[in-house]
């Protein structure tokens, strides 16, 4: 008789966003005329930049001609894209990342989960609380945790609380951990990390032989010139960090799919015989075996992000969503609701009013305002009493949603 991976049975009910979709679906079925506005999942709404569309169309034409048709591409991504990424995203910020250290992929969600393939089973793992649930759930699936307790915390994980009290910075753990997930600008709190904050992490990782899994999917939303966009802006990070980036949120590729992961060649971890092994080699081996690369057409679209027009167009998109975030913050503050984030990030982290729990606030917003957000407790125990509002929507919807919320909560 075939057996299952029992670790899946330890997972809490549904993955957060499908669970929200299920609840919203039930509400919509019962209230078919309700004008629901979704500010829950961080999914972009504005069209793909024109530069990307033109490049994609051209690539489609090339695929229609025998002389320029492409079959399997390199599993790591085409060099012309990796070189542009290296130059634009890293060299321009003083980070010494070579194109060969960049792996193009179909998403940071997949990569942050898949990266566990190359790590051992006995690593101690730290996550922030609240946290992007993928980091936790993929560790549960891989058997790196025990069961979940009543607070929603898994036995065996080290949780680093990010709260208003510590200004949503990730506290350095007292004990030694082997793998540390960090995400800045942060999902869900919208908080950012300074170079000083990241330097503390790099110093910690280097002195403990830890690896930082740094999710920079929202770096394009940083407007403060003093904030680092990449962990490699910190000296020594190439010896202790893997970085994940994405075209999803800056260039609207959530449905098009393209991302990248940087695994520096200087990065090593221990084999069970005590020898040092290059993680780059392992990730390359993993990707070559389990992944056939992102489509040529999509990589051409991603390449266009780095053209002059592409850069201007994505800056416009980013500005648009940041202006939405600013409207959300201003309107909620006018209704005496406390907000965090939303300045260098597309997420606004809201303190639920009147002491409501995260899910009670979710229900109230859905029923009274027909607005969907994400309950903070879905991101971890320390998210209880908070609520995430995403700035990814049309201006009209954001303004309408805020008018409804302020009308409900002002009085
Ligand atoms: C979110 O809403 O947290 C994001 O859309 C999730 C993701 O990018 O996978």
Image (spheres, rainbow, N blue to C red):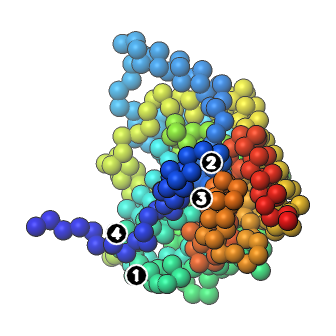
Sequence-first disc among 2 and 4:
4
Q: Quick check: which quadrant has ligand 1?
A: bottom right
Q: Nearer the viewer, mark 3 or mark 4?
A: 4
Q: Is mark 4 within 8 Å of ligand 1?
A: no
CB under 8 Å between callouts 2 and 4? no
Displayed quadrant of residue 253: top right
Left or right of 57, for residue 382 = right
Residue assigned mark 3: 215
Circle 2: is it few (<14), some (14-19), or many (20+) Cα within 10 Å?
some
Residue assigned mark 2: 34
- Nearer to me, 341 or 339: 339
- Image: 92 above or below 81: below
- Image: 213 above or below 229: below
Sequence-first disc among 3 and 4:
4
Q: Quadrant of the C terminus?
A: bottom right
Residue 297 showing in the rendered view = yes
Q: Nearer the viewer, mark 2 or mark 1?
A: 2
Sequence-first disc among 4 and 1:
4
CB under 8 Å between callouts 3 and 1? no
């Amino acid at each position: 008789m075939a057996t299952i991976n029992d670790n899946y049975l330890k997972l809490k009910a549904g993955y957060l966003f499908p669970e929200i979709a299920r609840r919203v679906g039930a509400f919509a079925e019962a209230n078919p005329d309700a004008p629901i506005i979704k500010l829950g999942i961080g999914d972009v709404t504005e069209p793909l930049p024109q530069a990307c569309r033109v490049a994609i169309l051209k690539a489609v034409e090339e695929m229609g001609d025998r002389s320029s048709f492409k079959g399997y591409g390199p599993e790591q991504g085409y060099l012309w894209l990796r070189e542009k990424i290296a130059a634009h995203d890293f060299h321009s910020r003083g980070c010494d990342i070579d194109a060969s250290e960049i792996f193009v992929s179909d998403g940071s969600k997949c990569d942050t989960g898949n990266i566990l393939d190359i790590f051992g089973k006995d690593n101690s793992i730290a996550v922030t609380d609240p946290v992007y649930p993928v980091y936790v759930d993929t560790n549960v699936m891989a058997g790196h945790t025990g069961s979940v307790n009543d607070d929603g915390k898994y036995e065996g994980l080290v949780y680093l609380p990010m709260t208003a009290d510590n200004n949503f910075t990730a506290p350095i753990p007292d004990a030694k951990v082997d793998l540390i997930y960090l995400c800045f600008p942060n999902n869900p709190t919208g908080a950012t990390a300074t170079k000083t904050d990241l330097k503390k992490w790099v110093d910690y990782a280097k002195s403990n032989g830890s690896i930082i899994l740094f999710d920079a999917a929202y770096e394009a939303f940083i407007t403060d010139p003093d904030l680092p966009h990449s962990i490699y802006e910190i000296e020594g990070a190439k010896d202790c960090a893997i970085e994940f980036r994405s075209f999803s949120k800056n260039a609207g590729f959530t449905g098009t799919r393209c991302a990248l992961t940087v695994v520096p060649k200087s990065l090593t971890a221990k084999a069970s015989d005590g020898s040092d092994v290059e993680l780059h080699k392992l990730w390359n081996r993993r990707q070559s075996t389990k992944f056939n690369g992102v489509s040529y057409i999509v990589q051409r679209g991603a390449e266009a992000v780095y053209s002059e027009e592409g850069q201007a167009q994505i800056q416009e998109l980013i500005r648009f969503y940041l202006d939405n975030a600013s409207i959300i913050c201003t309107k909620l503050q006018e209704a005496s609701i406390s907000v965090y984030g939303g300045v260098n990030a597309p997420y606004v982290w809201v303190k639920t009013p009147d002491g409501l729990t995260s899910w009670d606030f979710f229900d109230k917003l859905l029923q009274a305002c027909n607005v969907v957000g994400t309950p903070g407790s879905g991101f971890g125990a320390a998210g209880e009493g908070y609520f995430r509002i995403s700035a990814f929507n049309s201006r009209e919807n954001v303004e309408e949603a805020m008018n409804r919320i302020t009308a409900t909560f002002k009085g």
